[in-house]
Amino acid sequence: MSAAEELEKAATIYACEAIRLDKQGVRGMAVTSYQRAIETLLKLVRLHPDYGLNKVYIQRATAYRERILTLQGVSRPVEYQPTQEKTLEETRKTSYDELVLKEKPNVKWDEVIGLEDTKKAVKEAIIYPVQRPDLFPLGWPRGILLFGPPGCGKTLLAAAVASEIEATFISVDAASVMSKWLGEAEQNVARLFASARNSAEEGLPAIVFIDELDSLMGMRSMEVGGEARVRNQFLKEMDGIMDKGKNIHVYVIGSTNKPWALDWPFIRRFQKRILVPPPDRQARIQMLKLYTEHLRLSDDVDFNELGRLTEGFSGSDIRDICQSAQLKVIGELFESGQASNKRAKPRTLSMKDFLEILEERKPSVSGETLPLYDRWFETFKAL
């Protein structure tokens, strides 16, 4: 696969994830995924200035940007006026607000398919202490690390927990923190945790979700001074919420695809370290049924066989397979010239359609990396 094709694929994955989260009402994470799609599309345009589809990519990036503004409550872009100079405080606030998004996700617990051991560990760490804090005289975990291959449900799980306890959900992209916050980073990290504590003190639990945690808490051999200050401030803030004398409901959920890149001082501050693995066969069957429930299927579609054939596929891969099958029959409708008739519908999806899609797809998770997760889990697991 060429570099351009890889970028196209990455942009599509980010955009599909953004649209899915957008539909579920998870605004903060949807914005993050839209931003990643935009960055990938613009990188593609910069690297291949003569590419024939660049105009389309720019249009898509513009559309995603407009959607971000809508989700952030901005009705339209405000044009810069030279006479309207921003104060330093306004600039800092803009920087902070662009990276930290507070919301209440609308993700139901039963939307997290499979992962029974993982869900049990998260319930014990967060949901039960919120419901009955009087049963925990020794306190409860405040730091939960979710690690595993991409596309297996770490973000969805964190959103579902926040929805279950009706918590304020503060979503932060660690990579953006490190690239955009240097300069006023310590103050913004302090503001992040102060906001979470204020919510908890007002009786509303708060979950700080840090995506791509390894970008913020990775090995420190190559860091510069600004990065060291960000990490030290983060350690200080985490120590503050883990004070055993404080029974406030502030939780930090970190998500990473590369747990082996984390530095030890950060690992030990996450009392729960939970593997989120690819779905097993039964979970894959349930996902296939969920993602095709609104599609027209032929009687020959065998979910049990598709569950067997998708061994090693992530939850995100399963969704992409169903989406590709849908696009296949819709494409046929347009190519036949019947799409102009509003009553015309795509034909039903057959087992053959799914098999053809599977012939052209491989799991996004390399089989060689799975043993790495298992080994790290055996070394550092804390359920």
Image (cartoon, rainbow, N blue to C red):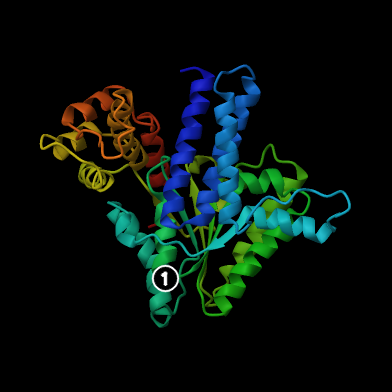
Task: Tell me what residue is drawn at x 63 percent, y 65 percent.
Answer: 193
Which residue extends farthest bottom? 134
| Left or right: residue 154 compared with residue 248 | left
What residue is disc 1 on?
Answer: 165
Using the rendered image of the protein, determine whether residue 282 is visible from the camera's viewpoint: yes
Task: Tell me what residue is drawn at x 30 percent, y 52 percent.
Answer: 115
Which residue extends farthest front? 341
Task: Tell me what residue is drawn at x 44 percent, y 80 percent.
Answer: 137
Q: Which quadrant is the C terminus positioned in?
A: bottom left
* Image quarter of residue 375: top left
* Image quarter of residue 107: bottom left
Q: What residue type is labelled 1?
A: Ile
Looking at the image, residue 249 lies above or below residue 381: below
302 and 206: which one is in front?
302
80 and 92: which one is in front?
80
Residue 219's spot in the image, x, y percent? 61, 41
Residue 226's spot in the image, x, y percent? 76, 47
Using the rendered image of the protein, determine whether residue 212 is visible from the camera's viewpoint: no
Looking at the image, residue 203 lies above or below residue 369: below
Which residue extends farthest left? 299
351 and 152: which one is in front?
351
Which residue extends farthest right? 83
Residue 54's spot in the image, x, y percent? 58, 24
Q: How many other residues sit within 10 Å of disc 1, few (<14), some (14-19) or many (≥20)? A: some
Task: Tell me what residue is drawn at x 20 percent, y 41 percent.
Answer: 296
* Image quarter of residue 63: top right
Looking at the image, residue 260 lies above or below residue 110: above
